[in-house]
Amino acid sequence: MSELIRKGEITPPELLETTIQRIEKINPQLNAIIYKMYDQARTIAANMAPGNKGVKSPDSVFHGVPFLLKDLFAECKGTTFSEGSKAIEGYISKLDTELVKRHKACGLIIVGKTNTPEFGILTTTEPSLHGPTLNPWNPGLSPGGSSGGSAAAVAAGIVPMAHGNDGGGSIRIPASCCGLFGLKPTRGRNPLGPIFGDVGNGIVHEHALTRTVRDSATLLDQTAGPDLGAPYFAPPPQRLFHEEVGRDAGKLKIGFLSSIPDGWNEETDLLPDCLDAVQDAARLCETLGHHLEEVMPAKLGYPGIPEFFGNIFTCYVGHVVAYWERELGREIGQNELETITWDSYQNSLKRTGADYLIAVEEIQRFSRKIGRWYHEGQYDLLLSPTMRIPPPKLGVFRATTDNPREWLQVALSMVAFTRTQNITGQPAMSVPLYWNADNIPIGVQFAGRYGDEATLFKLAAQLEQARPWADRIPPIHCNNEL
């Protein structure tokens, strides 16, 4: 798109209006975009039009490309910001967070904000405030969460990429559910400032969902790097990430999991579609010349991971509520929060500082074990399904008195593999290589060494060339409607 603009084949205002038409046509079927920023976007696009002294150079990488911002963490000054919660409905952001500044600086035009579960705490996107987002591959299924709105919008062809963030799998899970490429970078690669320096002991990471590997790598080039006062940051890459796309990966040593290691999850077996997907990906990697070894689950076992991660995540929920109470200058009542959120908040009040620090200590020990496994076995990557289960049906995350833990068991099955890299800080990607008999995407995850997005991008580009996915479109898609 940006190349077409630079060549003069289309102008930023024309491209923006095409995107707005797509939103108006497709979004009512998906409920992916919950805040429209048309007026602001039109002003920015007009300033980028030929002949104007625009605020952005035509040489900026994504000059004039429409973009969607997930309504969580990343704030855009002067716009409505709710994080999927009735408690803060109507709040107007006071500043641009650093990531949004970088989005704007590379020429992206933010045209709207996407749906997210309340405070991003669930692996589906069904907030009471805005209603559920539907999966464009099957509207009865969840698009995943918490970046489900962004994933649905990209999968449906509204925009080529959209912002997402990931505190337990929230980029990779929606990418898997919606047939997209989703990379969670190394801890500290993208900025969280100036409001936050470290969220939940470093479990939250920022990036995007894209259709192509190239776009993900190029966007990361534009946003990566510490902001002023960052508490820590990822080691600098050897070269630009987009230069890794198409670069020879060599012969990689890849371990793969066909079951969940002990202690990672209550359920350890994979459902058939997910097992088929990971075995298929392993075979494909072998045809590309890589060395695959099945990993015995005991090698990566560690008791109590759900409990320790759960303690930290529960404390995160408590922190979110406390943050907004300070920001709003008032207490948040039970009637303002969803049942699951309120229960998690109440549980957070029972946690002590010692409980939190013990959980931090345990997950750091787990991180060291994972790090030793890569180093001692000289593994480059770990392959697994992205999720233990295929995309679940909408509605299963409703808390009921008859089965109050049903939603939790589904959530644990969705994060069984992904939360590991939020704990360790390692980069990981969900790659859309497999569709089941019902034409539903089943993603596979590759996790790399700390700081090594380069190997992930090299392999992803190989996989994308060997088995292209960008032209696979769901039933609900702009090409089918316009």
Image (cartoon, rainbow, N blue to C red):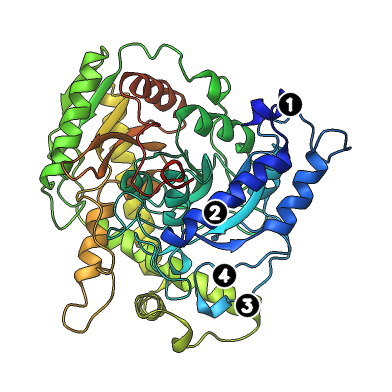
Mark 1 or 3: the one toward you:
1
Q: Which mark is residue 376?
A: none
The amino acid marked with disc number 4 is Ser
Upstream in sequence: badge 4 or badge 1: 1
Q: Which residue is mark 1?
A: 8
Extreme residue in the front direction:
482
At numbered mark 3, what does the secondary structure look like: helix, strand or loop? helix
Q: Quadrant of the N terminus?
A: top right
Report how far apart the C-alphas of labels 4 and 3 lie in the structure: 15 Å
The amino acid marked with disc number 3 is Arg
Task: Quadrant for residue 287, please give it.
Answer: top left
Nearer to me, 37 or 174: 37
Report how far apart the C-alphas of labels 4 and 2 lie in the structure: 20 Å
Discs 4, 2 touching: Cβ within 8 Å: no
Q: Residues within 10 Å of mark 3 (few under 14, many from 20)?
A: few
Report how far apart the C-alphas of labels 3 and 2 lie in the structure: 35 Å
Question: Would residue 227 be seen by someone viewing this image from the given angle?
Answer: no
User: How far across and how far down the image is residue 340, in percent?
Assistant: 34, 76
Residue at horizontal 28 percent and vertical 58 percent from the top: 141
Task: Quadrant for residue 479, please give it.
Answer: top left
Left or right of 267 in this view: 225: right
Discs 1, 2 touching: Cβ within 8 Å: no
Left or right of 328 in this view: 284: left
404 relative to 207, above or below:
below
Q: Which residue is mark 2?
A: 23
Residue at horizontal 58 percent and vertical 51 percent from the top: 21
The amino acid marked with disc number 1 is Gly
User: How far across and how far down the image is residue 391, in percent?
Assistant: 25, 53
Q: Residues within 10 Å of mark 4 (few under 14, many from 20)?
A: many
Upstream in sequence: badge 1 or badge 3: 1
Upstream in sequence: badge 3 or badge 2: 2
Q: Which residue is mark 4?
A: 82
